[in-house]
Amino acid sequence: MSPPSPPSPPPPPSPPPATGRSGSGRVPPRDEEERLRELGYQPVLARRMGGFGNFAISFSVISILSGCMTLYGFGLGTGGPAVMLWGWAGVGLFVLCVGMALAEVTSAYPTSGALYYMADRLGGRKWGWYTGWLNLLGLLGAIAGIDYGCALFTGAFLNLQWGVEPTPGSTMLIFVCILLLHATLNLFGVRLVSLLNSISVWWHLAGVALIVGALAIVPSDHQSPEFVFGEFVNDTGWDNPLYVAAIGLLLAQYTFSGYDASAHLSEETSNASVSAAKGIVRSIWVSWIAGFALLAGLTFAIQDYAGTQETATGVPPAQILIDALGSGAASALLLVVIVAQLFCGNAEVAAASRMVFAFSRDNALPGSALWRKVSSRTQTPVPAVWLSVGFACVLALPSLYSATAYGAVTAINVIGITPAYAIPVYLRLRAGDRFRPGPWSLGRWSRPIGWVAVVWVACVTVLFCLPQSSPVTVDSMNYASIALVAVLVLATVWWFVARRTYSTPAAYGNAREQAEIAENIV
């Protein structure tokens, strides 16, 4: 089969873009379609998303009502309340540094390819290639993790409301229905996606306020502040409390992921050079504050710690709501959480499909000629949407046979997407004054914040790979390290197949020549 045809050549060259190869200086504000052409791409997606919608998609993907609620049971045994609350506060601060550093690079390179395009421009083709595969597998794993988690919560709701016993088969059926719903919604175009994300912001904030308010007012008994902020619980089997506390940080770190969605939707956002950067940063700090309130509200309302951990619903937050508010109110609030998770999964499908579209546009995927097609009616990458949900479904299929498979899917998400955040930031730091910031810049704080971000991501990447319980068995194995190796091997193998056709277009000159120049920058 002949290789897919390369993207359309760019228009006549404009002045050199912000690649850091022609001196320093800031890119002045300009028309975003013109800016996209300067970066080498012809606009084909509809630019119908505003600044709030761009913020909303990252906020929806972070989804504190998804991440915090899904992993709350994990936090109960890996450090308990003290690590959950203080860990959330500390991790949120470091993630904010990562987000600010990434936002600065996003402002200079507002494309759907986002992380891999930045890495390609600042470091060369191989940097972009591996960043792209890490980011892509992370995004597809996130769809599987989010929507399967939503299916688990839906099963708990059905059990609570009608006594339906959740099984792996019924959970998988619910999961497939959720994927089909999200694919359908994404096919209607970015305007509907933006509207749903805007609703999602208020749904999340109102949902947190409702849950925390009800748990603060209704129960007659609450845990003490000493318990909430000082109780340490270790059910991991490991003896070292520092090790257990470090593992416990993963509740927060897993939740604080997906904010690159603002960058992936930048080709569909007005004033993207500013709006996408602001969307990343705002989504993190708003989630930071609201998530702390949610975790505190749940923990203060625990009536029976052991009973919460061993709940028959399989969802510890649901047991907290039942014990504190009664089954009727618990069902209603659980429904609030499920709807929030549906918003989250829908936003993640949008972000992942844009990454598939962008990576295919640069001939990086098998069958790229198909996946980069865009609907002339909705200006939506329809095949990329279906590939995203289809691959997510395949990733979750082992959950039919293994209880540990869901943890492996989560590992694919976090171990792929988290290192990908730091690579463009590191390359920006390496470029020094050769990097030309966009309209949104950290100024003199760029280097210190950037290095904090890189070091933090390096640390948490190690944490993601550490065993989380002892003894280590097939069921308790942390599959993140295996997922990381698998992604890198897959990327390396496919590199030797696609390296002749893969290339991001140069804004001026020859694409391959510009990539070779970047590879030689030390």
Image (cartoon, rainbow, N blue to C red):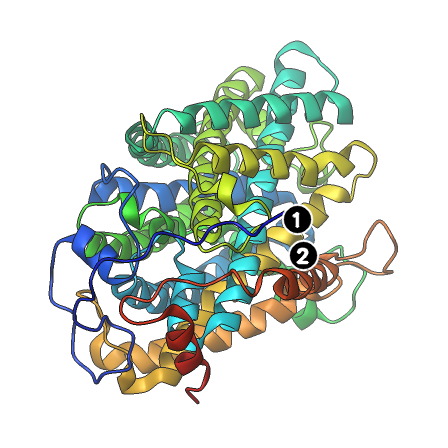
Q: Secondary structure at mark 2?
A: strand
In percent of width and height, residue 191 lies at: 28, 30
User: What amino acid is labelled 1 in the image?
Assistant: Phe
Q: Is residue 167 visible?
A: no
The answer to which of 420 and 2 lies nearer the viewer is 2
Question: Residue farthest to the front?
Answer: 2
User: What amino acid is labelled 2 in the image?
Assistant: Thr
Q: Is residue 511 left or right of residue 169?
A: left
Q: Callout 2 environment at 10 Å: few (<14), some (14 to 19), or many (20+)? A: many
In percent of width and height, residue 296 lies at: 47, 47
The answer to which of 447 and 287 lies nearer the viewer is 447
Question: Residue farthest to the top?
Answer: 162
- Residue 183's place in the image compared with 289, above or below, is above
Q: Callout 1 environment at 10 Å: few (<14), some (14 to 19), or many (20+)? A: many
Please identify the quadrant where the C terminus is shown: bottom left
Tag on residue 74? Answer: 1
Q: Which residue is mark 2?
A: 78
Residue that appears at 46% across and 81% down: 519
Q: Secondary structure at mark 1?
A: helix
In percent of width and height, residue 419 lies at: 54, 66
The answer to which of 76 and 302 lies nearer the viewer is 76
Give yes or no for contact between labels 2 and 1 (Cβ–Cβ under 8 Å): yes
Q: Is residue 55 left or right of residue 183?
A: left
Residue that appears at 33% across and 82% down: 447
